Image: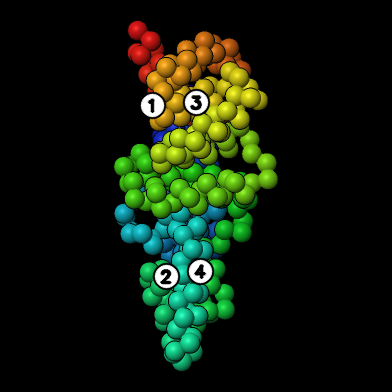
Amino acid sequence: MANTTTCPACGVAASGRFCAECGTPLGDTTCASCHAQLSAGAKFCHRCGTPVGERAPRPVGERGLAGAMPWAVAAISLLALVALVAGQRFARSRPAEQQSVAAADASGGMPAAGGANVDQSPVRAPDISNLTPEEQAERLFNRVMTLFEQGDTARVQFLAPMAVEAYQRLPKKSLDDRYHLGRIGAVTGVANLAGAQADTILQQRPTHLLGLILAAQGARMRGDEGVARGYDRRLLAALPAERKAALPEYAQHENDITRAVEGARSRGQ
Ligand SMILES: [Zn+2]
Ligand SMILES: [Zn+2]
Ligand SMILES: [Zn+2]
């Protein structure tokens, strides 16, 4: 593979202009609004604040919580709700012009969507209307996984429920979507979520590598090593044929598969 690099957002090997896994631009790109040159992985334009249309990474903490992480997009609707509630409470006892101040405070100092307008239109700021529900869910999933790999348990726990909700809202879930949902369960200690998604995947394709991996994880979370070993063996048995089947999600989750296969082999010895 020529020019293979590692996606800064999801960590898979990637080549070309966009990550095949998560869509993060791999090279420099420009702001759709003001055409400023953006660095690889920028989520928001540094000049005008326009969200970069594609999925994009940024090291956690570079700009703080309210900075430019994609999950802030989801958090904003939550914070806006908080702001709205706070505004309504203040409305009982305070003059109107102070409401927007209260709302701004409640939003944690997030760049306000136009000061006084916050009251009328609390859910503004980053424009996610150009993202499909599937893209929004995947963006949240990628963020949860990145935070998990960075050991940021607090933010994982904060963001995971939004990611789960985003997937549950999807009218139709692919097997890859179900794997994402199950992985969120696995990294947040919700064994039932991991197990249920694994079951659904394996009902549709009993040799699905990611379904088997997830099923083993779910069993281990429940402390059922015997059952987990059974899934390990099924994983190793299914591997050659499934490698040939080359489902797109296998390429996207190559790291997970490699890790699980290595684990299954070492435990099987
Ligand atoms: Zn990626
Ligand atoms: Zn811009
Ligand atoms: Zn996936």
Query: Looking at the image, do the residues carrying marks 3 and 4 touch, with CB atoms under 8 Å apart?
Result: no
How are the residues colored?
rainbow
Near-viewer residue (107 or 54): 107
Residue tagged 2: 107
Disc 1 residue lies near ligand 3 with CB under 8 A: no
Q: Which amino acid type is marked by label 3?
A: Ala
Judged from the image, the secondary structure of the residue bearing numbered disc 3 is: helix
Disc ID at residue 223: 1
Q: Which amino acid type is marked by label 4?
A: Leu
Residue lying furthest top: 269
> Which numbered mark, 1 or 3, is in the foreground of this view?
1
Judged from the image, the secondary structure of the residue bearing numbered disc 4 is: helix
Residue tagged 3: 215
x then y, percent, for residue 138 = 54, 44
Residue tagged 4: 81
Near-viewer residue (142 or 91): 91
Residue at screen point 46% across, 73% down:
83
- Would residue 260 be found to the left or right of residue 211 on screen? left
Q: Which amino acid type is marked by label 2?
A: Ser
Q: Which amino acid type is marked by label 1?
A: Gly
Residue at screen point 36% across, 59% down:
65
